[in-house]
Amino acid sequence: MNNSSSIGQEWAARFATLMGERSERPRSAPLETVELLTPEEMAEADRRTVAAGVRSAILMERAGAAVATAAGRMAAAGARIAVLA
């Protein structure tokens, strides 16, 4: 963490304490092709899904679950994972 960071030193120290010491190098994501949507495309997909009757809260829960699943697949058993958005 350098002094030009937008994250305060106190917060960074707390984060490091919560995460603990790393005993192994983090794994990278699998090398597979994933199609990504632009922010505009995702907003349109969300709009259409809500218009079809799916509540936006359900969309957010599903997105969170998908991130948790993907992160869990990349980490060793029992590893700590932090998702910052």
Image (cartoon, rainbow, N blue to C red):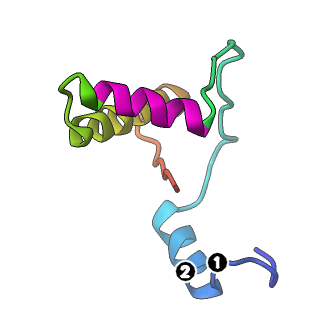
Task: Inspect this view and state whether residue 55 appears.
Answer: yes
Out of 63 and 11, give the one closest to the viewer: 63
Residue at 56% of width from left, 29% of height from top? 41
* Residue bearing the label numbered 1: 7
Magenta segment main secondary structure: helix
Residue at 69% of width from left, 78% of height from top? 6
Residue 20, horizontal then vertical, whole percent: 52, 62
Residue 1, horizontal then vertical, whole percent: 75, 74
Q: In the drawing, what numbered circle is on residue 45?
A: none
Horizontal side of residue 64 vs 27, given as left or right: left
Horizontal side of residue 13 vs 46, given as left or right: right
Q: How many numbered tags mark residues here? A: 2
Residue at 63% of width from left, 33% of height from top? 38
| Label 2 crowd bin: few (<14), some (14–19), many (20+), radius 10 Å | few
Q: Residue furthest toward the top?
A: 32
Three-letter amino acid code of the residue under disc 1: Ile
* Residue bearing the label numbered 2: 11
| Label 1 crowd bin: few (<14), some (14–19), many (20+), radius 10 Å | few
Out of 59 and 8, give the one closest to the viewer: 59
Give the magenta part as a residue range.
39-49
Three-letter amino acid code of the residue under disc 2: Trp
Rendered position, 85 above or below 51: below
Task: Inspect this view and state whether residue 76 appears.
Answer: no
